Each structure stands twice: as C-alpha cells, then as structure tokens.
C-alpha cells in the first residue's frame, strides 16, 4: 500500500492532510500532529483576540476548495464580518479545525483510510526496498511518502544570554507563554519589534497593566501598517515585475522599485510591494548565494517590515501604549543579558553607540522565525541531517529542496517520496510561510502524490463535503 505520513500538526500539516484526504485513496494517510491541538500550530493556537491576522479575511483559507469560506465561518462567530477585516487569529484556528473536521467526516463516509497520532515523529529512515519507516513512540509506520510540515524551530536563546539568566526563569523563550509568569513584573523587555513582538507587547500590556514595557531591536522599526481598505493595484506592476525578473541583483532590484515609486507619486508603495508577491519566489531563486547573503544582511530588515505588515488595529494599540508613556522602543543591539532577578540587559544604542544597562524582571525573546536546522534542537530534523536525508540550507533557511518541496539528499539528489511544506523551504522559495502560499503548496503536493500513486480519481471528497455542509 502507498501509505503517506504527514508530520506536523500546524496549519500546513492540516492543509496537506485535508487535501490528501480529499483525493488520495491508494493507502492510509497518517497524520502525526504532536501534542498540541491539531490544525492550529504556533500562529493560530492563541486565545488572545488582540492577536490579529496580518492578512485580510478574504485572503485567508486552508484548502483550495473549501466547504465554506472563512468570512462566512467568522460571521457566525463574530457577527457581520467584511472580507477586508483583519480578524483574530483564534477564529482562523477554529476555521481550520472545522474544515479539517468536515474532510474527516467525508473521508469516513467515503471509506478512506487515515489515522491521527497525538505524538511526535521521532525518526524517518529510508527503507531498502523503497519508501520510508517513520517512528512515533514505539511504533514504526511503513509509508511510501513523507511530508514534513514541522514549521519553524523552537527559539534558541541569543548567544548574549548568560546561563544564569536562562536558569533564572525570568528569560522567556516562548513569547506565547506569558501566562506562566504569575508574578507581575515591573518592567518587561521584549527583544524584537516584529509581528510577534507586537502581539507579545499587546498581551503584556493587559496582563500587567502597571508594567513598564520596553522593546529593543537593531533598527527599532515596527512592521509597517496595512491600509484600512485594500489599495488599488499599481497599473504598471506587470512591466515592473518583468523588469525585476530580468535584474539579476538585489541592488538593481531595489533601484527599480524605488524608481517605480518615484515615477508614480499617487501610488501607495504598499500596492507595489504586494504586487510583487507572485514573483517573490522566482526573484529569490534568481539570486546567487552571494546575492542572497547580501539581501539577508542589508535589506532583510526593511523587506520584512514592509512585506509583513501589521493590522491597523494592532498599530493603533501600539501607538497608544507609546503615547501613554507605557511603551518605549529602542534601536539598540543586545550585548548581554545576565543576572537573575531582575535581569541586567546591556544595550548598545544604534545612533550614539552608547552602552547602557537596563533592569528587567522579565525578558521575552521575540526574534522571529528560526529555521537554522543545523543548530536547532529538533530530534527529527537532527536525525534527518545526520543520516543524510536532509541537508541544511547554507544560509540557515531550512533544508535544501526542489521548488515542489522534494528534499535533496547529501549528494544533491532529489529524494523520491520525501517532501517538505512551509518554512523549511525558505531557502528555495523564500516566500512560503503564510497561508496563501501554504494552501497552494498543499494542494499541488496532494494532487502530485495522488497522481504518483496512480489512484482512482477524481472521486473527490471535497465535493462531498460541499454537498454535506449546510453552510457551503
Ligand atoms: C505569530 C504568527 C502569526 C502569523 N500570522 C499569519 C497570518 O495572519 N496570516 C498568514 O497567512 N500567515 C501567518 N503566519 C504564518 C504562519 O507561519 C502560517 O500561517 C502557518 O501557521 C504555518 O504553519 P506551519 O504548520 O507551517 O507551522 P507551525 O504553526 O509551526 O506548526 C508546525 C507544527 O508541527 C509540530 N511538530 C514539529 N515537529 C514535529 C514532529 N517531529 N512530530 C509531530 N509534530 C511536530 C509543531 O509542534 C507544530 O504544532 C503567522 C505566523 C506566526 C508565527
């Protein structure tokens, strides 16, 4: 039997599992979800409704063909919702679970074979006769294909954090676990000013209304903000995109984007950045290793702030905290975090190069996605690297793979039946971590695997779900 294992219980795993349930009937689909609630992963497990999606409701979805759209689902929970709204991420987590639940019901009715395991996959070995053996606990599963949807790595402490600071319990590596700090801190220092830092500060401001909040990052730059309403597209986007694809270098790409902005003063810069989204993976693939490194070193910070923008309501809440004097932001490098209670945080200010030390009762590391698999402590990924079934991207952006997600082995050969989806593919695709891209990738992969297993098609459970769902 051509069984499949999907490893990872986040949104990408849910998308891959649901797409496979709808079209793969050559064997059993094993979904190994880890110990958290399946489908939500890191982004959609939050229960704090101040944590908003950074994509408008109309742009969010989990499958290519859904039983109902996200706006309909959210309207049932929240009242009237517009496609242009930025909704709480919790609601999208509920939506994923409902959509996967509908596919599971339909798969049961269709007699499809699947199993869900609330545990981690610990090892993946290549079998001599082809296919893979996947270990979860004491059990080995023999499968033809493996889809790795394990997300980014758990954060590693910055090198500047001392062992005593880490042991003190006052240095938090998981920004989504503020709830485990029961004693109200007088000052909370958040390292990072990206989207995760914004959410962390909004939660901290409510959890500890009297705490002073400080956010520190090298540039001290918040993500830019989405416009309240969608922007008109830049009329010459296609020409611009063609010329960007012909550029062959980061500096000349940036010059072209700047020129386009100068020549179209009435156009909002955000529509030009958004209009590049369909070609971002291609642009990235055109760059040489050296050019990618240059981009990461010199342009990434401004690209990330411009491309991954925050919802207008999040921006307003952050500005209000700043205006009330409760939140300060500093452009500085963290030189050291030491001590215990309180922690001593030594900073070098970007503008003046002055070094100073701040005391904080709680320091939260919110420094963004870590995909440096060669350095992370992820049992499964470490084993895959050790056994030559995966190779770390040289710029620490996940693993080496083809654009369709097929992993390369230590000899650079694409491996039959071993795929990844989501942030592990940043080295190849760059733009692959958000739902719009994950959703397309999951659909393509499921179609490809279903076809590869030469299965009876198109008996499509998705259509049954639509028929069965009264809201569809
Ligand atoms: C805070 C935040 C907000 C975001 N907001 C948006 C947004 O508004 N819109 C958008 O489109 N995108 C957003 N994103 C991007 C987001 O990354 C994707 O939307 C999506 O959630 C990625 O899901 P994932 O499954 O790839 O990763 P994850 O959410 O990290 O899920 C991976 C899962 O795999 C599990 N796992 C790991 N190893 C194993 C193993 N060995 N065995 C079994 N399970 C394992 C992990 O425990 C985890 O549950 C956001 C990301 C973050 C972090």
Image: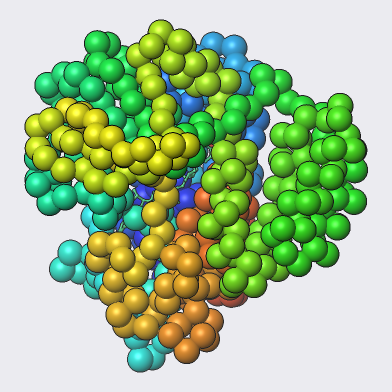
Q: Nearer the viewer, residue 286 or 186?
A: 186
Image coloring type? rainbow
Residue at screen point 18% across, 36% down: 344
Q: Where on the picture, by quarter, is residue 200?
A: top left
Q: Is residue 40 above or below residue 312?
A: below
Taking 244 as reference, is 6 left or right?
left
Residue nearer the viewer, 100 or 81: 81
Q: At 48% across and 56% down in the image, what residue appears?
A: 423
Q: Give the number of callouts.
A: 0
Report x, y in % for residue 82: 64, 18
Check the picture and name the quadrant holding the C terminus. Answer: top right
Residue 32 relative to residue 72: left or right: left
Q: x, y percentage for residue 224?
A: 59, 31
Q: Residue at x 9, y 32 (%)?
A: 341
Q: Picture quarter containing residue 409?
A: bottom left
Residue 206: in sight, yes or no? yes
Q: Position of residue 76 (x, y in %)?
A: 52, 17
Residue at the image point whose x is 56% and y is 51% from the top? 300
Query: In terms of depth relative to the viewer, which is nearer, 405 or 110?
Result: 405
Extreme residue in the top direction: 324
Question: Residue 161: image x %, image y %?
Answer: 21, 48
Q: Is residue 336 above or below residue 80?
A: below
Please indicate whether residue 409 sits to the left or right of residue 184 in the image. right
Q: Which quadrant does the N terminus fall into?
A: bottom left
In the picture, residue 121 is in which quadrant? bottom left
| Residue 48 appears in the rendering | no
């Amino acid at each position: 039997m051509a069984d499949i294992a999907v490893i990872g219980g986040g949104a990408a795993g849910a998308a891959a599992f649901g797409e496979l349930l709808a079209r793969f009937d050559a064997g059993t689909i094993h979904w190994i979800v880890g110990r958290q609630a399946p489908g939500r992963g890191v982004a959609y497990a939050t229960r704090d409704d101040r944590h908003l999606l950074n994509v408008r409701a109309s742009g969010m979805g989990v499958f290519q063909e859904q039983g109902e759209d996200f706006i309909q689902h959210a309207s049932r929970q929240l009242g009237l919702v517009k496609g242009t709204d930025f909704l709480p991420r919790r609601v999208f987590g509920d939506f994923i679970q409902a959509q996967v639940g509908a596919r599971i019901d339909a798969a049961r009715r269709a007699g499809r074979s699947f199993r869900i395991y609330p545990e981690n996959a610990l090892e993946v070995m290549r079998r001599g006769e082809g296919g893979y053996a996947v270990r979860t606990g004491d059990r080995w599963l023999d499968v033809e294909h493996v889809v790795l949807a394990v997300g980014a790595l758990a954060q590693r402490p910055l090198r500047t954090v001392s062992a005593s600071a880490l042991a003190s319990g006052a240095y938090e590596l998981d920004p989504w676990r503020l709830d485990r700090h029961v004693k109200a801190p007088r000052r909370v220092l958040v390292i990072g000013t990206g989207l995760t830092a914004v959410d962390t500060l909004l939660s901290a401001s409510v959890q500890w209304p009297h705490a002073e909040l400080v956010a520190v990052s090298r540039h001290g730059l918040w993500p830019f903000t989405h416009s309240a309403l969608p922007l008109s597209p830049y009329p010459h986007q296609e020409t611009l995109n063609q010329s960007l694809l012909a550029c062959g270098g980061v500096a000349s790409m940036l010059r072209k984007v700047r020129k386009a902005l100068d020549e179209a003063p009435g156009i909002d810069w955000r529509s030009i950045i958004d209009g590049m989204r369909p070609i971002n993976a291609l642009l990235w693939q055109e760059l040489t290793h050296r050019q990618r490194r240059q981009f990461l070193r010199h342009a990434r910070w401004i690209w990330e702030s411009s491309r991954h923008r925050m919802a207008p309501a999040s921006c307003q809440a952050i500005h209000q905290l700043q205006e009330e004097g409760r939140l300060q932001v500093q452009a500085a490098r963290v030189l050291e975090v030491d001590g215990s209670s309180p922690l001593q945080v030594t900073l070098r200010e970007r503008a003046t190069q002055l070094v100073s030390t701040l005391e904080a009762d709680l320091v939260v590391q919110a420094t963004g996605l870590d995909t440096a698999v060669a350095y992370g402590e992820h049992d499964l990924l470490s084993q895959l690297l050790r056994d030559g079934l995966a190779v770390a991207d040289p710029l620490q952006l996940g693993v080496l793979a083809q654009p369709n997600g097929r992993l390369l082995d230590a000899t650079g050969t694409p491996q039959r039946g071993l795929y990844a989806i989501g942030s592990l593919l940043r080295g190849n695709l760059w733009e692959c971590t958000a739902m719009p891209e994950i959703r397309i990738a999951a659909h393509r992969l499921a179609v490809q695997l279903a076809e590869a297993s030469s299965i009876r098609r198109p008996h499509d459970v998705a259509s049954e779900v639509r028929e069965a769902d009264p809201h569809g």
